[in-house]
Image (cartoon, grey):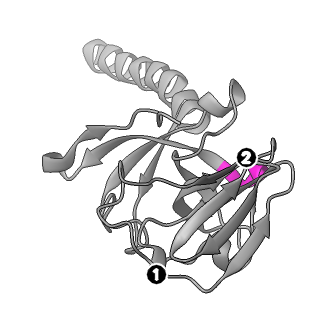
Amino acid sequence: MKKVLLFFSEITRITIIAAIIVIPIRYFIFQPFLVKGASMEPAFSSGDYLIVDEISYRFHPPKRGEVIVFKYPRNPSNKFIKRIIGLPGENIEFRNSQIIITVQSGQQIILNEKDYLEFSHYSFEKKEFIIPEGHYFVLGDNRLYSFDSKNWGPLDENYIVGRVFLRLFPFTKINYFQKPKY
């Protein structure tokens, strides 16, 4: 009987120690995310299991090209995955199948997405967006079929959960995602 009590007390102690270690990591540092839908194809497919880094943005702001997970502003119980295209204070314009960004200095750049998109030609109706401070412009990689900032406007930074850090599943596509070179 004494051995059984000792066994259960040891199991209880291990469970409590594991919970003390795992729970803070899960809720404050890294979070799992399961991709649903085709808006980020070909980079991410429905069913991909990702790990989201929730701590990096406490030390530096998000960067253009990073893939983030965020709470959808119109229904925060839903989480989306998209790529950051525009930064606070910038102007985004869709013109002649290109994305033209006017940065805060006034310089215009044509977004070059060859590093992460297999195609570079897509067509949007001509639109222009001014990104207010504290907001980001996000697009899905599957541009024509993604519900994103071109539909509902810039994303408030308070809705950002974190940056996609690691793909764990499918096993054939395990990948660590480095920060973009912009």
Q: Residue 36 at x, y = what percent?
A: 40, 70
Q: In which quarter of the image is residue 12?
A: top left
Q: Residues within 10 Å of mark 1 (few under 14, many from 20)?
A: few
Q: Residue 42 at x, y = what percent?
A: 30, 64
Residue 144 disc label: 1
Q: Check disc 1 and give the amino acid type.
A: Leu
The answer to if 177 sits in the magenta stretch is: no
Q: Residue at x 47, y 37 (%)?
A: 180
Q: Which residue is drawn at 47% across and 74% down?
A: 143
Q: Residue furthest left?
A: 172
Work out whether residue 138 or residue 9 is closer to the camera in this orientation and state it. Answer: 138
Work out whether residue 97 or residue 142 is closer to the camera in this orientation and state it. Answer: 97
> From which residue to which does the magenta span run?
156-160
Work out whether residue 8 or residue 158 is closer to the camera in this orientation and state it. Answer: 158
The answer to if 159 sits in the magenta stretch is: yes
Q: Check disc 2 and give the amino acid type.
A: Gln
In the figure, is residue 104 to the left or right of 53?
right
| Image vertical order of residue 136 relative to residue 166, above or below | below
Q: In which quarter of the image is residue 27?
A: top right
